[in-house]
Image: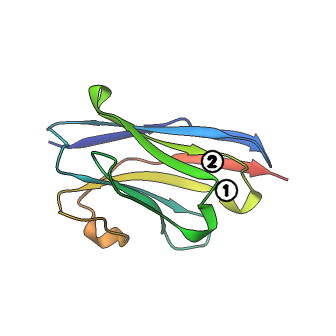
Amino acid sequence: QVQLAESGGGLVQAGGSLRLSCEASGRTFINYIMGWFRQAPGKEREFVASSTWSGSNTLYLDSVKGRFTMSRDNAKNTVYLQMNSLKPEDTAVYYCAATRVDFIRTRQEDYAYWGQGTQVTVSS
């Protein structure tokens, strides 16, 4: 059974940084697309970033380009989301997701597996 576990969320001031981790277990993730989504209070869940497990192709939400970087450590079966220059509007619960498809997806409906989420709060 596929399991995803996020960690690394917290409270940070605007302009600060956080690194989220998503540890995957249950199977080999070589052929999986990994994604990060977020849901702010009162808003729908939105796509943040997605990457092939190899890291050869990555896509970002326009508003996080240049500030967020998705990476992975295959030996640890873990993907990361490095978030720099954080803004109050980045405040949300961040979710890691995985799906076994052959190219990057941005719709949450395309992801079969989800973590429990980790809270990120950016104060102004």
Kind of residue at badge 2: Val
Q: Is residue 57 left or right of residue 61?
A: left
| Cα distance in 3D space between marks 1 and 2 | 5 Å
Q: Where is residue 43 in the image (x, y as percent from the top left)?
A: 58, 73
Q: Residue at x 71, y 51 (%)?
A: 86
In the orientation shown, which residue stands out farthest toward the front? 56
**Of the residues under marks 1 and 2, which one precedes in the sequence?**
1
Q: Where is residue 61 in the image (x, y as percent from the top left)?
A: 53, 67
Q: Can residue 45 be seen in this view?
A: yes
- Work out whether residue 35 or residue 60 is closer to the camera in this orientation and state it: 60
**Quarter occupied by the N terminus:** top left
Residue 82 versus residue 77 in the image, above or below: below
Q: Residue at x 53, y 48 (%)?
A: 69
Kind of residue at badge 1: Thr
In the orientation shown, which residue stands out farthest toward the top? 75
Which of the numbered marks, if any, corresponds to residue 32?
Answer: none
- Work out whether residue 73 or residue 115 is closer to the camera in this orientation and state it: 73
Q: Residue at x 17, y 57 (%)?
A: 100
Mark 1 lies on residue = 91
Residue 39 versus residue 74 in the image, above or below: below
Circle 1: element type: loop
Q: Is residue 41 visible?
A: no
Mark 2 lies on residue = 120
Looking at the image, do the residues carrying marks 1 and 2 touch, with CB atoms under 8 Å apart?
yes
Q: Where is residue 98 in the image (x, y as percent from the top left)?
A: 28, 53
Name the image quarter holding residue 107.
bottom left
